[in-house]
Image: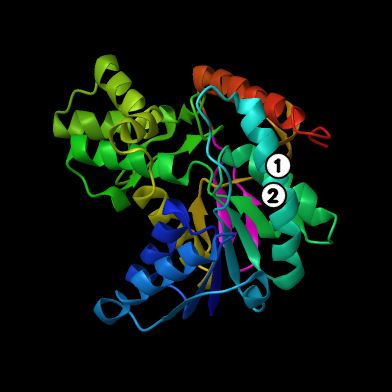
């Protein structure tokens, strides 16, 4: 099973490395505008194969994406000092208008996973570009708040002393400052968070919740301040998404996908719990947020919609 990774910067390379470490797929093709970078990353990752799982890793062109089951879109430009978000959107729009048609032309049957930020807006744009080439929307989605959800569960795990697979918690809305942590829906071993804390004698007061919220919401800022970029977490999230698709695992993940309506806003792309499988997005699940969380989600969705509408040519 072939997986394409377009963009071999830190995110794309980390995703490819995570795929090898997890043993996802059988062949990985790295495609990049800067061929030397793709060749170097492919060689470096290939040298890790003897310590992981049998796999072919190579650099290639868009034509080499033919037959790929999954293509991860990690290409794009970084924000320049003093550059506004709208200016960044404009430059990344130009990149996507060039790259996405190449991907869907050579890998028309692939599931396309967008990782480029701002991921909600870029996923919406990708769907629009791909639709012009006859590609169904359900096969295109973004990594969304998959990593934010993992951060939320990891921090709860550390605080509660429970392994993360037994904690159900979701982050929805924008992958960004306005994202919403669904505290009211947290479950631990089938118990509500309040029931679990009462049974175990834990106190999780507002101050502690605020600390966890801040750690999730602003994790990227702290990491970027310390080392310039985030890539291991999102690389692992992308590898997990590819694993779910290739294995048709029907997993529930907080990816972002276009929707006719969310929280009163129409034609928008934000993260919500979705069932993922071999055909891509199979269904969007409702999440019963409390009143304050729902209001926060409404605000988050409206922020993303404004950004979508600011795209060259509008969001429609």
Residue 1, compared with residue 245, is above or below; it is below
Residue 10 percent coordinates (x, y) = 42, 52
Residue 79 forms part of the magenta stretch: no
Residue 66 percent coordinates (x, y) = 67, 77
From the viewer's side, name the closer residue of 154 and 182: 154
Determine which of the numbered discs, if any, sits on residue 93 in the image. Answer: 1
Between the residue at mark 1 and the residue at mark 2, the CA separation in whole angstroms equals: 5 Å
Packing grade of label 1 (10 A; few <14, some 14-19, many >=20) is many
Residue 249, compared with residue 129, is above or below; it is below
Q: Identify the element where label 2 is drawn.
A: helix
Would you identify the image quadrant in which residue 168 lies? Answer: top left
Horizontal side, residue 21 vs residue 144: left or right:
left
Packing grade of label 2 (10 A; few <14, some 14-19, many >=20) is many
Q: Identify the element where label 1 is drawn.
A: helix
Q: Main secondary structure of the magenta part?
A: strand
Q: Which residue is mark 2?
A: 96
Residue range highlighted in magenta: 269-287
Horizontal side, residue 239 vs residue 211: left or right:
right
Q: Are marks 1 and 2 in contact (CB under 8 Å)?
A: yes
Determine which of the numbered discs, if any, sits on residue 63 in the image. Answer: none
Q: Quadrant of the C terminus?
A: top right
- The residue at 62%/33% (across/down) is 88
């Amino acid at each position: 099973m072939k997986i394409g990774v377009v963009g071999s910067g830190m995110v794309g390379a980390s995703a490819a490395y995570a795929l090898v470490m997890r043993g996802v797929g059988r062949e990985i093709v790295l495609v990049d505008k800067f061929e030397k970078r793709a060749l170097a990353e492919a060689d470096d990752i290939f040298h890790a194969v003897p310590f992981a799982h049998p796999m072919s890793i190579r650099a290639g062109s868009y034509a080499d994406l033919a037959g790929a089951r999954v293509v991860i879109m990690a290409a794009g430009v970084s924000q320049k000092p003093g550059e506004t978000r709208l200016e960044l959107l404009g430059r990344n729009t130009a990149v996507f208008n060039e790259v996405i048609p190449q991907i869907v032309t050579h890998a028309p049957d692939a599931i396309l996973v967008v990782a480029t930020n701002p991921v909600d807006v870029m996923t919406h744009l990708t769907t629009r570009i791909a639709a012009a080439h006859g590609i169904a929307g359900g096969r295109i989605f973004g990594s969304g708040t998959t990593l934010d959800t993992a951060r939320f569960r990891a921090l709860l795990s550390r605080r509660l002393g429970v392994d993360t697979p037994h904690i159900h918690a979701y982050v929805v809305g924008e992958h960004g400052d306005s994202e919403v942590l669904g505290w009211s829906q947290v479950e631990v071993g089938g118990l509500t968070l309040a029931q679990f804390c009462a049974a175990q004698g834990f106190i999780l007061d507002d101050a502690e919740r605020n600390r966890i919220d801040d750690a999730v919401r602003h994790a990227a800022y702290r990491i970027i301040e310390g080392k310039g970029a985030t890539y291991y977490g999102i690389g692992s999230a992308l590898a997990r998404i590819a694993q779910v698709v290739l294995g048709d695992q029907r997993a529930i993940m907080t990816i972002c996908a276009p929707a006719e309506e969310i929280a009163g806003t129409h034609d928008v792309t934000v993260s919500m719990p979705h069932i993922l499988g071999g055909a891509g997005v199979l269904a969007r699940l409702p999440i019963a947020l409390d009143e304050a969380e729902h209001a926060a989600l409404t605000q988050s969705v409206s922020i993303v919609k404004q950004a979508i509408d600011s795209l060259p040519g509008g969001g429609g």
